[in-house]
Image (cartoon, rainbow, N blue to C red):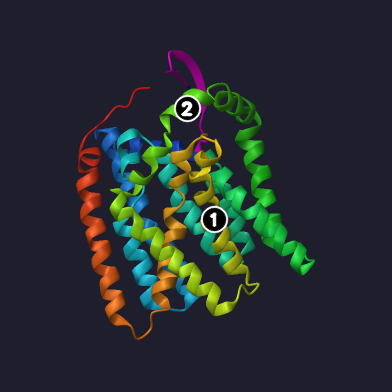
Amino acid sequence: MSIAVVIWGQQLTIYYPPLFHLFSLAFFLAFPTVDPYLILKVIVAVLDSLQLFPIYFIVKEVSKSTAGASMAAFIAMVTPSDFNMIAWGGYPNIAGLLLTAVLAYFVIKERAVAVGIVSTILFLTHHLSMLFAIAVLFPYYLIIWWRTRKVPSCLLALVAALGLAFAVFYWQALIPQFELYTTNASQYATFTLSADWPNQFGHFESFSPLLILAAIGIGLWVYKYRLRFAKSDLFLYLWFLWPLLLGYSFLFGIRWDVVRWIYFLQQPACVWCGIAVAQFKGRKYLVVVILLVFVYQWINTINGYYWDISSNVVYTY
């Protein structure tokens, strides 16, 4: 689908993948007397909350620790990076984040059919999420192919999903979208200022524990397994590394969509936090300290985003 909008003083045509809008339309038709904006807020709040489940099961699958998986889900709940999306209208992005987490679970489980289905839904829901998924998964599967000398079945499923998405939507939207972002790159960079991105996780002082604990989790895991070649480990490293590098790309003079890439960092960071906690067996006092730190994060998040969540804000460019 496409819409004509006025941004930066010029009329532009923006293309959006159709699935989220068709999904929302079904609710609009089912509840014609309810404010559509309220319906959208409820939908995205539910989709946002559902992210806790794939994050829990990913950590449980990798670490075999219920405590670590529970802590990962709790941290994901108290460090949401996307509350303000509910205010400025990034609804498909939230759906994309949920689908990204579900896709990550099936990638780790190596379920090719599920990877193909979820990838197709993701690609037809949110285009930036599609780019992120491709950036993580294609290098991952190419490395697997190179190491095993076998074509991963999940790679074939991913290619099939990409082909289907292209045939349904991207054949008509890809070039206009590319031209839109490249033509207006300088204006778009001013909208996504690098200095703003730590606030996507609440206040900066409460953002730091998330990355610190995630870094501890990665360090402990590398020390424990000495960088073994495990498919799930490789995927989790790439999943965390890409949004971190893209978010810090402003340090290298690259300012394209800096803030939006940071939205994809929270999920793998929470997963690595859970893996860190899973290594603290017998150290309950550490778990209690971590719990208290992130309760404080929860309070900061609620205070920081209360106005955004409770207000119907219209952002203009």
Name the kind of residue labelled 1 in the image. Answer: Leu
Q: Nearer the viewer, residue 123 or 299?
A: 299
Tell me where residue 115 sits by quadrant: bottom right
Q: Say above or below: 125 vs 48.
A: above
Overall secondary structure of the magenta stretch? strand
Q: Does residue 144 appear to the left or right of 277 in the view shown?
A: right
- Residue 91 in sight from this viewpoint: yes
Contact (CB < 8 A) between labels 1 and 2? no
Q: Residue, x 47% and y 27% (percent of image)? A: 188
The span from disc 1 to disc 2 (Cα, nearest Å) is 24 Å
Q: Nearer the viewer, residue 315 or 122?
A: 315
Q: Residue, x 58% and y 28% (percent of image)? A: 177
Question: Residue beneath label 1, please?
Answer: 241
Image location of residue 282, percent across then percent down = 35, 86
Image location of residue 248, percent across then percent down = 49, 45
Q: Which residues are magenta?
A: 4-18
Q: Nearer the viewer, residue 23 or 15?
A: 15
Name the kind of residue labelled 2 in the image. Answer: Tyr
Q: Residue, x 62% and y 41% (percent of image)? A: 165
Does dot 1 land on a helix, a strand or a loop? Answer: helix
Q: Residue, x 63% and y 68% (percent of image)? A: 231
Quarter that holds the C terminus = top left
Q: Nearer the viewer, residue 29 or 112?
A: 112
Does dot 2 land on a helix, a strand or a loop? Answer: helix
Mark nearer the N terminus (1 vs 2): 2
Residue 188 tag number: 2
Tell me where residue 113 sits by quadrant: bottom right
- Residue 61 in sight from this viewpoint: no
Q: Say above or below: 8 vs 308.
A: above
